[in-house]
Each structure stands twice: as structure tokens, then as C-alpha cells.
Amino acid sequence: MLVKVFGDRVTLGRAAAEQAAVAIRRAIAERGQARIIAATAASQLEFLDALTAAPGIDWSKVEAFHLDEYIGLPVTHPGSFRKMLLEQLVRKTGITHYHLLDGDAADPSEVVRRAGKQLASTPVDIAFLGIGENGHIAFNDPPADFETEEPYIIVNLDEACRRQQVGEAWFADISQVPKRAISMSARQILKAREILVVVPGPRKAEAVKLCLEGAISPMAPASILRSHPDATVYLDTHSAALLSPALQNALSEASQVMVNS
């Protein structure tokens, strides 16, 4: 895993977007289309702003999936990830080939089955992720299921995850945050050819330290990304603040550092 640190979240977002744009253009040039997985959250705003403004991307040849959605939340709710995906990516680029997880459908298991079949039909070129305050990727809260091969799964959200959503002002209080969600599985995320992880802000510092320096464990879900052959983590000085002195020194002496599995 390659780790890069930037001085602020805007610079971080622009740098990550440059790498993402290269990957998308390359996939289109080589295969005639690009399949992407897009994270949507407050932490991704600067990155998606820069990516949607990147030149030379034929968005008509991009197919987009998103990572997760609350069960029982309408698309009109400010915290809906479908709403964010539409606003932050689809409408800005004119993507016509995208897949929404209908969290308020009558039968979530049918949504999981249908979306999973579409996702697994062809390899994904690049996945864009964040890391939650509890170390989750998508909505794989600890202890995450590292074994299932199902592309999407129905999960129970832990209290730390639900409190994060309140802290980010998507919900007024924890009683309003749904307790279940549809999430892309950890093993499905790892099947992407390339993974790009955007993690700004001081509230993510503890999760970053645990996932980059602790054991690869379901209790630190994002730690599994260290097993991927082509994953890059973009941090700012705030999210990198709790990393060990040795890693901090290495990052201060170079623009990027490899973290082994």
C-alpha cells in the first residue's frame, strides 16, 4: 500500500483526482470503457469536485457503482448516499450508466442480489474509498466479514458508525440514523484492479493509525486494503497526525511511503 500525505484536504483531493483521472482514461483507452466504484460522503467532496472537473474523460464510457446505502432511507434525505452520488458525480459529469442501491425498496435482499449480479459481471477498474472513524470501508463495521464472496451484503451498523453520521450533520440525533444498510463486501472491494483511498481530517486519525500500523484484522476493516497489490491512501496532516514517529519521519523525508501487509 502506498501512503501519501498532503498539507490540506483541497490539495489532497486534487492529487487523488489526478490519479483517478489517469486510471479512468487508461481503462477507456484500453478496454473502451471504465468501471468505477464511487464513495460518497463529506470526506470525498474535494476529491469528487476535482475529479468531475478533470479534462479528457469521456464520461459516457464510464459505468459507476456506489459502495453502500442505508436501509429505509429515501433518496430525498440529505444523508442518502444515492442523493450524494447523483449530486456529487452523476449530474456533474452526465454519466448515464450508473447503479443506485435502492435502500428503501420493499425487499433489500432483492436489491443486493440484482446489484451484486451487475457488479460482478465484469472487473472494476478503480474503486474510490474513504475510511470511517471506526475503521470501516463502505459499511463494513468491525468486526467486518472478510470471508464472504457476496458482492453486496446487508449489515448492522455499529454505534460508532451511526454517531459519525450525526457528527457530520446528516442526522439530528442517533435515533434518526438507520440501524441497517446495504454494503459492498470487503472481498468485493479488493477485486478492483486499483484502489484509491481518500481520508482527510482529524476525526479519522485514530482509524488511520489502526488500519495502517495495526494487525490486518476484521476489527480494523480498512487494514485489509494493505493486502491489495495496487492501493494508494491519500492523507492530510490531520488524518496522519497519530502515525508512529518512524512513519511520520519517513513521510516527511519523501512524498510517499510504502506500508507493507
Image (cartoon, grey):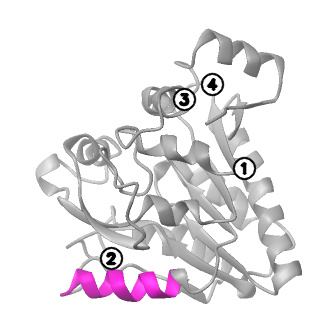
- Label pair 4/3, CB-CB below 8 angstroms: yes
Q: Position of residue 245 (x, y in %)?
A: 62, 10
Looking at the rendered structure, which numbered label has been put on residue 128?
Answer: none
Closer to viewer: mark 2 or mark 4: 4
For disc 3, the marked residue is 239
Residue type beneath disc 4: Thr
- Placement of 54 over or under 28, stated as above or below: above
What residue is rendered at 49% in x and 71% in y?
Answer: 66
Q: Is residue 112 magenta?
A: yes
Query: What numbered label is drawn on residue 75?
Result: 2
Label 1 – label 3 distance at C-alpha: 15 Å
Amino acid at circle 2: Val
**Going from the N terminus, do you reach mark 2 or mark 4 first?**
2
- Which segment is the magenta one? 106-119
Q: Vertical placement of 124 versus 43: above or below?
A: below
Q: Secondary structure at mark 1?
A: helix
Locate residue 37, reporting x and y percent: 57, 69
N-terminal label among 1 and 2: 1
Above or below, comparing residue 42 to residue 123 in the picture: above
CA gap between label 4 and label 3 equals 6 Å
* Residue 237, numbered label: 4
